[in-house]
Amino acid sequence: AIAFSASGKQLITLSGIPDFKLSVWDVSSGELICKTNLSLSPSVNRISTYPLNWKQMCMSGPDCCLVWSVEECGGQFVMTSSRVALPDIDLATATKSGNET
């Protein structure tokens, strides 16, 4: 998965097998701003950034949603995440019965 920040100044990438790394790049310099190894291989197929702040990102897939924040202190960047609990529903059933959310 790959995404640009709204300003186009940052590029966010998620690598696959074998390392599963989430990385943030400075587009103009090509330098790596920060990265983190994901402990599990998430079933993620989308990455997006908050339009007003590239330091807030969301990774989502059919069964997970992770919100990431990039914190900066003294020129060092660190990424932290929190998992958003998704409702346990069968989308096929919900769509057929008109209970689509």
Image: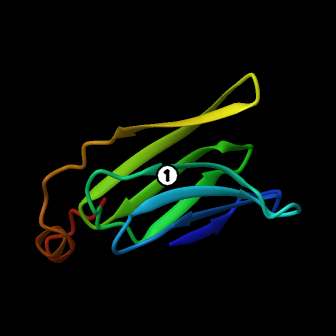
Query: Residue 46's spot in the image, x, y percent?
Result: 47, 68
Which residue is depicted at the point 12% across and 66% down?
90
Dot 1, how many residues are within 10 Å of its Cα: few (below 14), some (14-19), or many (20+)?
some
Instruction: Name the colouring of the figure.
Output: rainbow
- State left or right for residue 93 relative to residue 30: left
Q: Quadrant of residue 64?
A: bottom left
Q: Quadrant of the C terminus?
A: bottom left
Position in image of residue 85 (x %, y %): 25, 43
Whole-percent x, y for residue 57 in the image:
56, 49
Residue at 48%, 48% in the rendered image: 36
User: Which quadrant of the structure image shows residue 41?
Assistant: bottom left
Residue on which the image places disc 1: 58
Q: Residue at x 29, y 51 (%)?
A: 39
- Percent x, y of residue 54: 69, 47
Q: How many marks?
A: 1
Helix, strand or loop for disc 1: strand
Q: Compared to 74, does 12 lie above or below? A: below
In the picture provided, is 14 more to the left or to the right than 93?
A: right
- Classify residue 5 as left or right of residue 40: right
Q: 58 or 86, which is in the foreground?
A: 58
Left or right for 32, reference 58: right
Farthest residue, direction right: 28
Q: Nearer the viewer, residue 21 or 8?
A: 21
| Residue depicted at 50% across the width and 72% down the height | 1
Amino acid type assigned to the residue bearing label 1 in the image: Cys
